[in-house]
Amino acid sequence: QVHLVESGGGLVQAGGSLRLSCVASGIIFRVRTMGWHRQAPGKQRELVAIITGIGATNYADSVKGRFTISRDNAKNTVYLQMNSLKPEDTGVYYCNVGPPSAPGYWGQGTQVTVSS
């Protein structure tokens, strides 16, 4: 059974930073591309960053230059370092495999709130 558990969210002022973590179990983590997604209130979930098993990364234009995705295969963990946060970064952040994401793998997510 696959479990993805996100943590590290919180309330931060605009311009601040947060580091999110996602611990995975039940998958062969080191070979899987992993992605961070977010869902803002009233909006669809969007993909913000991905990292392949060998560490290649890609970012949504809205976060490029501010967010950094990384992974520790020994800990089955993927991270999202978020700097220069903006109020529009507010939302629930989730990790998943892929893309394509696996519909049954979504966890509870972690709430990020950026105040202006």
Image (cartoon, helix red, strand yellow):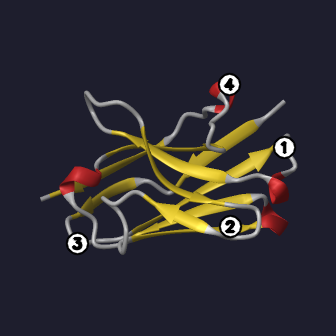
Label 1 vs label 2: CA separation?
A: 15 Å
Give the quadrant of the N terminus.
Answer: top right
Residue designated by label 1: 27
Question: In whole angstroms, how far apart are the C-alphas of marks 1 and 4?
Answer: 13 Å
Work out whether mark 3 precedes mark 2 in sequence or the reverse, and give the earlier one.
3
Q: Residue at x 20, y 65 (%)?
A: 14
Residue 52 appears at what percent x and percent y?
Answer: 69, 61
Q: Position of residue 60 (x, y in %)?
A: 40, 57
SS state under label 3 = loop
Badge 3 crowding class, 10 Å Cα cut-off, few under 14, some 14 to 19, many 20 or more, is some
User: Which percent across, then down, holds residue 80?
Assistant: 52, 63
Label number found at residue 46: none
Q: Quadrant of the C terminus?
A: bottom left
Residue 38, placed above or below residue 7: above
Q: Give the amino acid at mark 4.
A: Gly
Three-letter residue code for mark 2: Arg
Up the image or down, 35 lies above or below 68; here it is: above
The span from disc 4 to disc 2 (Cα, nearest Å) is 22 Å
Residue 37 in picture, x, y percent from top left:
48, 45
What is the quadrant of residue 79 in the picture? bottom right
Residue neighbourhood size for the residue with mark 4, other residues' Cα within 10 Å, grouped as few (<14), some (14–19), many (≥20): few
Residue that badge 4 annotates: 104
For disc 2, the marked residue is 71
Could you tell which of marks 4 and 2 lies nearer the N-terminus?
A: 2
Of callouts 1 and 4, the N-terminal one: 1
Of 45 and 22, which appears nearest the observer? Answer: 45
